Image (spheres, helix red, strand yellow):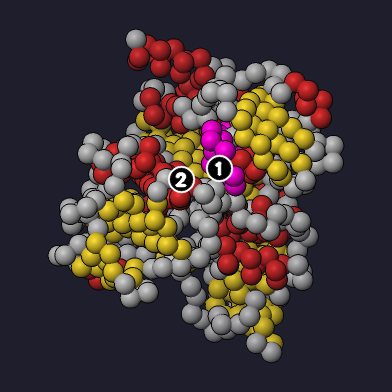
Amino acid sequence: MTENIVIIGGGQSGVQLCDSLRTEGYVGAITLYASETHLPYQRPPLSKDFIAEGADAVALPLRAERFFADRAVDFYPGISVTSIDLGIKTVTLSDETSTNYSSLVFATGARNRTLTIEGSNLAGIHYLRTLDDATLLRGELAQATRTVVVGAGFIGLEFAAAARQRGLDVTVLEFGPRPMGRVLSEPMSRYFTEAHTRNGISMKLGEGIAAFGGDGGRITSAIGTSGTEYPANIVLVGVGVIPNDELASAAGIDSENGIIVNATLQTSDPDVFALGDCARYPHAQTGVMTRLESVQNATDQAKTLAKTLTGYPANYDSLAWFWSQQGPIKLQIAGITDGHDKSVLRGNLQANKFSIYCFRDTALVGVESVNSPADHMTARRVLTSGFPISPEQIADSGFDLKSHLKAFELADRG
Amino acid sequence: MSMITYHHENGHTDLIVAVAGTSVMRAAVINGVEGIIGECGGQAMCATCHVYVREEFLDLLPEMSDDEEEMLEITASPRDEVRSRLGCQLKITTSLNEIAVDVPPMQVQ
């Protein structure tokens, strides 16, 4: 049978995989199905630059339009896969045709978790993930004066900061005790609460959403779990995502909060793989089954999988890193800080330029940096090289981390 | 309409027509100019749109922010103290309506 790698999903990981397969020398067919009709685009700017006043209304593409022809990728925008037959290695498509595959890759991503509470269907309540979501939101923002943001995660806070920069009154409701509590250390969460508050955003922690109030079918307020009513003419809900794993489980592939894969990103069917937001994999550093939603994770998994699919099986073991731009604050995270038991600050908190180093059993597991990109890049090198560094050294502002790291890297290579 | 010229190490040149407000990174990504990645989408956070600006345009460039200054210290190809900039921070304006850059050999270590 002729080789045909079928990729489901035209997001960051699916498009990167097309690119990397050709870079690795794969000469067979590549077929890419994307449910959206747009040229594949970068999602991160949608909650930042794209919704700023006077910003460029055109999304930044992941690749130039001619990329697909140049790399001989059969790209089908607006076509989704409706079912899979693992036995005869065939996918059935939304246009009722079908295609055979030699390898099948799920790059199906995730979708927003939605609210089903009183008033949740009112006009003016938005979610943000796709270009269409962002275009709609941006259009309404021009008239809006007051916004309530439900959920103090990355998306919610990026939007909150951008809305504040546009001059809106902004209230953030967060059910948990601190913002970005799922990913950040406690001191970093506290910094963000204070920084956003200083910036004029009203941060309501420990306040969930109970209902929305409306008038004539349009949002007028959000009602918190405390019973407090917050006036709003636009609402953004950012309460997490659900991995798109239903198509895989319907075909009989093991899934549970994501499509389950091994270290080579292979599913329970040997000819089927999954990567990016939809895949749950054994994390190389922590050993824990992990599902990450980030550009780095999508990109690096695609590069790894391209090796496996071209005959050089590779385990995914890249260092995780993330970023978020919240108004004037640049946050960058290297590593996974889950379960750390000690955090050490280095830099200048008052000057909004510092990093928090997170340790578990005295080993560095992750670094969170604010407005300190050089710290972040150094942290990535420290974590990748395995350079042993102690909390005491980090706490010592006179300790020259960069030159010690350099010496270690040279000795390691030598 | 303005012109951005990207010179590659192998002698190849890309000439891209760009509109006001477009950055050197964005024009490259949209048009598939090799060697410019723009992984962070233009936030001065990844240093994968590093360029060496040709001498004759250096006087026309916008001032460098602290973030850009810091990112240029960690580029994959060595920094040129005079000519290195991040493409995402160089936008076409009335004062910068033409620019030529050299694309560095590497953007990722």
Residue type at the position of mark 1? Gly
Residue type at the position of mark 2? Asp
Residue at the disc numbered 2: A70
Residue nearest the viewer, comparing A274 with A294? A274
Is A310 covered by the magenta stretch?
no
Q: Residue at x 48, y 80 (%)?
A: A116
Q: Position of residue B66 (x, y in %)?
A: 70, 31
Instruction: Tell me if label 1 and label 2 are in contact, CB under 8 Å.
Output: yes
Chain letter for the residue marked with disc 1 in the picture: B
Residue A377 to residue A123: above or below: above
Instruction: Name the quadrant containing residue A170.
Output: bottom right
Distance Cα–Cα, label 1 vs label 2: 10 Å
Residue at the disc numbered 1: B32
Range of the magenta residues? B29-48
- Furthest-right residue in this view: B95
Magenta-colored segment: predominant secondary structure: loop
Q: Residue at x 33, y 36 (%)?
A: A24
Q: Residue at x 61, y 30 (%)?
A: B13
Residue A175 to residue B49: above or below: below
